[in-house]
Image: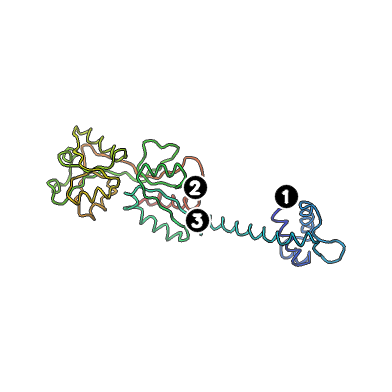
Amino acid sequence: MSATIKQLRAFVAVARSHSLAQASAQLHTSQPALSVAIRNLEDATGGPLFSRDSRQLVLTPEGREFLTRAEQLLNNWDQSLDAIQQRFRLNRGQLLLAVIPAFALNRLPELLASFHRDNPQINIVLEDIVMEGVVQSVQEGRAELGISFRPEDLGGLDFFPLERDRFIAVTPPQHPLSSKEALRWSDLAAYPFISMNRGSAVRRWTEQAFANCGKVARYLCEANQLSTIGQLIRANMGVSAVPSLCEGQMLEYGLHCHPLSAPVVYQEVGILMKSRGTLSAAASAFLQSIQQDPG
C-alpha cells in the first residue's frame, strides 16, 4: 500500500494540533474519516505513528521522525503543483521558437510584442535561422514551433499556412531597371545577380524561375542571409529577387522593389510543429494568437 497526499495532510494536521477535532475542522473532513486516513497511513508505513497508550494524541519516536519528512514532502508537492498551475495559467513558462530571418526581422517583432503584453511572465527563446535550420530545430525538439516557408519534405511535421508570399525584384536606386514599375525574371538575367547560397530553398526557387523563363542568371555573389543580399545591392554590386517578406527591410536600405513576373513565384509561409505530441501552454497560446492575426 502506498501513502497518499491526503493521508500525509491528515497526519501532519493531527500531529501539529494534537486533536482530531481541530484537525478535522482544519481539513474540512469528519473525525472518523480522519482516523481512517491515519490508520491507512500507518499500514503503509508499517507501524504506529501515534501512541495509543495515552488520552492525548502523542507521536511515537517513528512518528516524530516521519513528521519532518512528511512536511518536506507536502512542501515539495505544493511547490510542484503551484509551478505547473502557473505554467497552465501562463504565469510562468517558456516559448521556444525557430523562425526564418525574413519573418523574424519583418513580421515577428509585433507578434511577439503583442504576445508579451498578454503573457508578460513567459520567457521567449528565439532561433532566427535559415529555413533548413528551422525544420531541423522543430524536428529535434529544440523549438516547439517554427515559422518558415513550406518545406518540400515535412519529415514528420505539420504545416499550417499563414500567408502567401510573392517574390519581388530588388534593384539599386541608380540602376537602369530601377525606374521600371514591374520587372520580369528575364530582365534580371541581363545584370549581375546576387543570390542565396547553393542548397537553400530560396536559391532553388530562383534557379527554377530563371529556367522557366529560358534565361541563365549571371550569378555574381552568394550570401547566407537575405539581409546581406540587400546590403550588397545597396553597394551597387547587382540585382536580386527576394521574398516580399523582405520588402520593408529592402526599402529601409534605400532600394527599389518591383513586382516580378514571368513567372510569378509564390511560396506559402506558415507554422511548423511536430505531427505527434502536445504543445506546452505557452506554445499553444502563441499558436492561437498568430493564427488569429498573422500580421
Kind of residue at disc 3: Gly
Seen in the image, is 98 located left or right of residue 88? left
Q: Give the quarter of the image for residue 218.
A: top left
- In the displayed structure, does residue 225 sit left or right of residue 75? left
How far apart are the two marked residues, 3 and 2, measured between alpha carbons? 12 Å
Q: Residue 111's spot in the image, x, y percent?
A: 38, 55
Q: Are marks 1 and 2 in contact (CB under 8 Å)?
A: no
Residue plotted at (46% across, 57% down): 123
Q: How many marks?
A: 3
The tag earlier along the polypeptide, 3 or 2, is 3
Q: Position of residue 290 (x, y in %)?
A: 40, 51
Amino acid type, label 2: Leu
| Rendered view: 40 above or below 199 | below
Q: Is residue 163 above or below residue 77?
A: above
- Asked if 155 appears above or below 64 in the picture, the reply is above
- Give the x, y percent position of residue 122: 47, 58
Q: Nearer the viewer, residue 259 or 209?
A: 209
Residue 44 numbered mark, or none? none
* Residue at screen point 54% across, 58% down: 86
Between label 3 and label 2, give the one nearer the viewer. Answer: 3
Which amino acid is tagged 1?
Answer: Ser
Quickly name the residue at label 3.
93
Residue 279 tag number = 2
Work out how far the residue at label 3 is from the one at label 1, CA to CA, in angstroms.
Answer: 32 Å
Q: Nearer the observer, disc 1 or disc 2?
A: 1
Q: Counting other residues with Cα less than 10 Å from the Cα at mark 1, is it few (<14), some (14-19), or many (20 or more)?
A: few
First of labels 3, 1 by sequence position: 1
Disc 3 + disc 1, Cβ < 8 Å: no
Q: Which residue is mark 1?
A: 2
Q: Earlier in the sequence, mark 1 or mark 2?
A: 1
Label 2 packing within 10 angstroms: few (<14), some (14-19), many (20+): some
